Amino acid sequence: MENKKPIKIIFDTDIGGDCDDAGALALIHRLCDKGEAELLAVTHCGNSPYYAGCIDAINRFYRREVPVGINFSASLAEDPRGVYAAMLCEKCSNRYPSESYGTEDGPADTLALLRKTLAAAEDNSITLIATGTLDSLARLVLSGADENSPLTGKELIAKKLNRTVVMGGRFFESWPMTLYESGNPSHHVMTWEYNILGSGYDNATAVFENWNSELVLSSYEIGSYIVSMVGYAKRAQEGDPVALAYQIHNGDIGRCSWDHTAVLEAIRPGTYWNLHEFGKISIDQDMVTHWNKSPDCKHTYLLPKKDYEEIRQELDRLLDGR
């Protein structure tokens, strides 16, 4: 698949816990290798001395040096080492060892990097992918002018972003059933979705009430039954930090492709899923997302189009570098 111009990507992630974030970043790099995307910056919605090194280890493995931001305004993670963040930071080559945290040699602040990258971009040229909580997006949309731009966050979003694709949400309007992860009834899924719940009501509301450009949610349902990267560690190149992340997180049995789906839709829009009608997304007090009719908003979410197995096979081909 070819694009006339690479899609310019900012990737905001909560990498370090669940391994699908690592897989999603690897997928972005694979699509960059194919000339379909250009990765401008990677930001983290959380705060830990190990997150920047974890991100940079993957970027360097794919031979790219990309600006990295950490959300210093967030509380320090309850477990700063994460599930695999510290291991990648300590074991894999990167520019941000934990000792650089908070120093001039360390990563940028997430909000500053988001605003700087958007300010330098052409109008309507950036696709923002978010696969963690909405903390970074809330900080951006509520931000005021700074040394990077005289525009507010809302103005930058309206002027510079083409679209935003978020992994998050549950939409019972289209999926009224209770879902079970990987078909296992012991893994009951609540009505809320983790990334939205983890954002907190105030941050989620700030984003949904103020996001004034195209906003697409790849909800929990979309990636739940696409288990990709099974056996990846056995196929991966020696020293691949993504393979290490998957092994540490859950062995070599693969993982649901929640974050991968957001990447695919962002870089290959309309190829694998249909879009629900545009309207406005809101959140209730139980942290459940809802779609509402609104002629003034371009919020939507993904609906099935292609067979899950076909998408899984394509993901594995891409991630294997084929």
Image: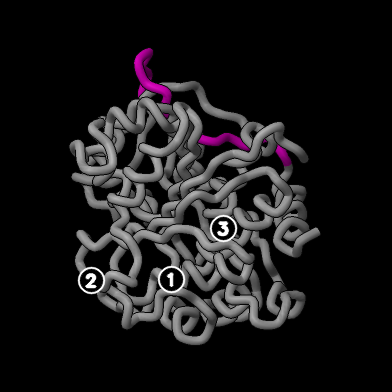
Whether residue 178 is visible, yes or no, is: no
Residue 6 percent across, percent down from the top left: 64, 39
Secondary element type, mark 1: loop
Residue 319 percent across, percent down from the top left: 70, 61
Given the current orientation, which residue lies at the most extreme right position? 322
Q: Which mark is residue 24?
A: 3
> Within 10 angstroms of label 3, few (less than 14), some, or many (20 or more) residues?
many
Instruction: Say whether residue 116 is left or right of residue 227.
Output: left
| Residue at 62% in and 57% down | 29
Q: Magenta stretch containing residue 303, yes or no?
A: yes
Q: Along the line of sight, which residue is nearer the eye, 109 or 77?
A: 109
Among the 4 quarters of the image, the one containing residue 95: bottom left
Tell me which label, 1 or 2, sits earlier in the chain.
1
Quadrant including the C terminus: bottom right
Q: Which residue is mark 1?
A: 16
Quadrant including the N terminus: top right
Q: Which mark is residue 76?
A: 2
Q: Amino acid at mark 2?
A: Leu
- Marks 3/2 in contact by CB < 8 Å: the verdict is no
Asked if residue 275 is positioned above or below residue 236 in the image, the reply reads above
Mark 3 vs mark 1, CA separation in Å: 12 Å
| Residue at 47% in and 47% down | 10
Instruction: Say whether residue 234 is left or right of residue 256.
Output: right
| Residue at 50% in and 32% down | 125
Instruction: Say whether residue 91 is left or right of residue 191.
Output: right
Q: Amino acid at mark 3?
A: Ala
- Marks 1/2 in contact by CB < 8 Å: the verdict is no
Q: Magenta stretch containing residue 148, yes or no?
A: no
